[in-house]
Amino acid sequence: MNINSNGYTYIFAIAMVVIVASLLSIAATSLKPFQDKNVELEKKSDILYSIGIEGEDSELLFDEYIIDQLVIQDGEIVSSDIKAFDIDMAAAVKELNNIRKVPLFKAFKEGNTFYVIPMRGKGLWGPIWGYISLKGDGNTILGASFDHEKETPGLGAEISTSIFQDQFPNKVLFSESRDGIEVRKGDASGYQQVDGISGGTITSVGVQSMLEDCLVPYKEFLLKLSVNENQISMDSIISIVL
């Protein structure tokens, strides 16, 4: 074959495309288990971070501090073919709230029980997600961890920094006036407001909407925790008085 002909050039180009595509496919297939493992470890690390646990071996720490994984639907614990950890929140949030199955992680740390709620929403340029950890009353926030796919650096991307996240501890999710946390433009006050990111208004609103939407399937379950916690406290007071 004449290597200077157009036919040879076309055949060579097609052959190279096939070879490169095959190599890329093989590489992607062989690397996928490692990529999946990294995603799993990052998810475990984020869950632990929301309850104030940090360390190099997130898998070991996860098994130590997370004592139960529940699947919640419409405020009740349900059985599911899918494990709580494996629930895809990106798909779950597309379901109607009353049929949506969502994961809830129960943690035990320093003699106290905590609950971690995964969340998923929309920012300015793409998805945002996070984890809110609650104290035993199911209402008071212990900690928060947020992240994003491609929010603007220095603006919306600041939701993943401690400057934003450190506002959440000791805020409450439920009150007579609202469910969730209101993200304000620099004038936050009280137990249900935090300051948004300056210049990142749409991302900040996205966090608020994410909180409001993702709390719905958990609300009744969490309110029951609050009632039980108050009853335990009252029983303790009565026993002391008697």
Image (cartoon, grey):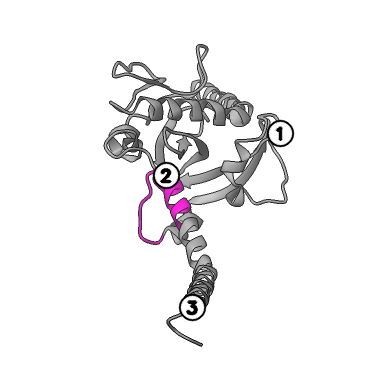
Q: Residue 85: x, y in percent?
A: 58, 50
- Residue depicted at x 38% and y 49%: 53
- Residue depicted at x 55% and y 31%: 214
- Residue depicted at x 61% and y 47%: 87
Q: Which residue is mark 3?
A: 12
Specify few, some or many for label 1: CA neighbours under 10 Å numbering under 14, 14-19, or 20 or more.
few
Residue 131, relative to residue 9: is it above or below? above
143 or 23: nearer the viewer: 23
Magenta stretch: give its range.
41-57
Q: Earlier in the sequence, mark 3 or mark 2?
A: 3
Q: Earlier in the sequence, mark 3 or mark 1?
A: 3
Q: Amino acid at mark 3?
A: Phe
Horizontal side of 82 relative to 46 (left or right) equals right
Residue 127, relative to residue 233: is it above or below? below
Q: Secondary structure at mark 3?
A: helix
90 or 63: nearer the viewer: 90
Q: Residue 125: x, y in percent?
A: 42, 36
Q: Which residue is mark 2?
A: 149
Q: Secondary structure at mark 2?
A: loop
Residue 220 painted magenta: no
Specify few, some or many for label 3: CA neighbours under 10 Å numbering under 14, 14-19, or 20 or more.
few
Judge depth for marks 3 and 2 and give the one in front: 3
74 or 122: nearer the viewer: 122
Residue 43 painted magenta: yes
Q: Quadrant of residue 238?
A: top right
